[in-house]
Image: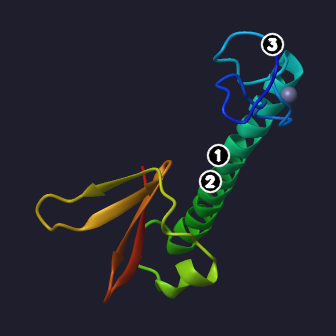
Amino acid sequence: MAISANSKEIRKCLWCDEYILEGRSDKIFCNLKCKSAFNNKKNKEKNLVFIQTDKYLHRNWEILDKLYRLSEGEKYIDRLLLTTKALRPIYFTGMEREPTTGVIKYIVYNYSYEVDTKLGVKIYKV
Ligand SMILES: [Zn+2]
């Protein structure tokens, strides 16, 4: 088969960038090895996102666990403690709003916390 610049037959493998000279017109890899390599890389990148997110969630859980014990489950603690312990507030597993007060609790697995600008942080164990 002759390959020309305006030919519809010109296709390149998504993995190795070699021309695909045979097979179905919708073929995007030159062989199974290239297809596997491409998908392995894609999955590895996806898994890194999950691993990093899980790491931050687990770290937040450890911080809340430690601070909950410090607060004896009762007292408000200085909200700067969350910052100094490096809690990442954008990582949580859920949130709920108290219907009457409108206070938002951020949930990290079996802990939740609310931030009061005057009183500080109150941590709950679910
Ligand atoms: Zn290839």
**Along the viewing direction, whichever of 12 and 62 lies nearer the viewer:** 12
Which numbered dot is residue 53? Answer: 2
Q: Which residue bears the numbered disc 1?
A: 50
Residue at image point 63% right, 76% down:
86
N-terminal-most mark, 2 or 3: 3
Is 18 rendered above or below residue 112?
Answer: above
Label 3 to label 1, Cα distance in Å? 37 Å
Q: Give coordinates of residue 23: x percent, y percent.
A: 76, 10
Nearer mark to the viewer, of 3 and 1: 3
Secondary structure beneath label 1: helix
Q: Residues within 10 Å of mark 2 (few under 14, many from 20)?
A: some
CB of mark 3 near ligand 1 (< 8 Å):
no
Q: Give coordinates of residue 38: x percent, y percent.
A: 78, 33
Residue at image point 34% right, 62% down:
105
Is 87 rendered above or below residue 35?
Answer: below
Q: Which residue bears the numbered disc 3?
A: 22
Residue contact at pointers 1 and 2, CB within 8 angstroms: yes
Residue 53 located left or right of residue 122: right
